[in-house]
Image (spheres, helix red, strand yellow):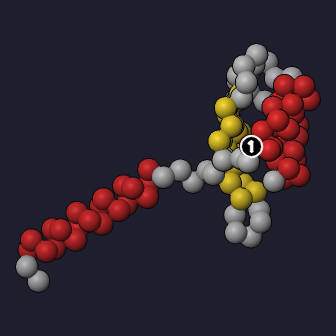
Amino acid sequence: MHPTVVYLLIAAGVLYAMLRARRSYWTIQIDYVPHQPPKIRGVASSRTQQITRFLEHDLRLEDPITILATKERSGRLRTRIQGKLDAGTRQRIRNFLIEML
């Protein structure tokens, strides 16, 4: 095989890997800052009011948080919640998302 072809194949592989790595694994992202409307991505617009109500009225958070979630093919919901929260509040958020999605 000609060396130029090998270099092109390697470059194409590296480019593909970089594009795959750049794409987010998380399909849902919710950024919440107290006293501001949450930024919600990846959720149907019909559900955004429920999420906003839950964050603002049910949880009454004092610190900003970021919620990342994705639903796997098996139906399992994976979540990552960033911010100052206790384990019970994290579990309430996870239960809410499971119920809503």
Q: How many numbered badges does the structure rendering display?
A: 1
Residue 25 in the image: state x and y as whole percent. Answer: 57, 54
Looking at the rendered structure, the secondary structure element under dot 1 is helix
Name of the residue lying farthest toward the bottom:
1
Dividing the picture into quadrants, the one containing residue 47 is top right
- The percent position of residue 81, horizontal first and vertical second, equals 71, 39
Pick the residue in front: 44 or 38: 44
Asked if residue 94 can be seen in this view, the reply is no
Residue at 82% over, 23% down: 61
* Residue at position x 35%, y 62% in the image: 16
**In the rendering, at what x and y percent does residue 88 appear?**
88, 37
Q: Position of residue 49 (x, y in %)?
A: 82, 35
Instruction: Please state which of residues 61 and 43 is positioned toward the viewer in this rendering.
Output: 43
**Residue at the spot of label 1:** 45
Q: On the picture, is 16 further left or further right than 59?
A: left
101 lies above or below 33: below
In the rendered structure, which amino acid carries the disc numbered 1?
Ser
Q: Is residue 91 above or below residue 18?
A: above
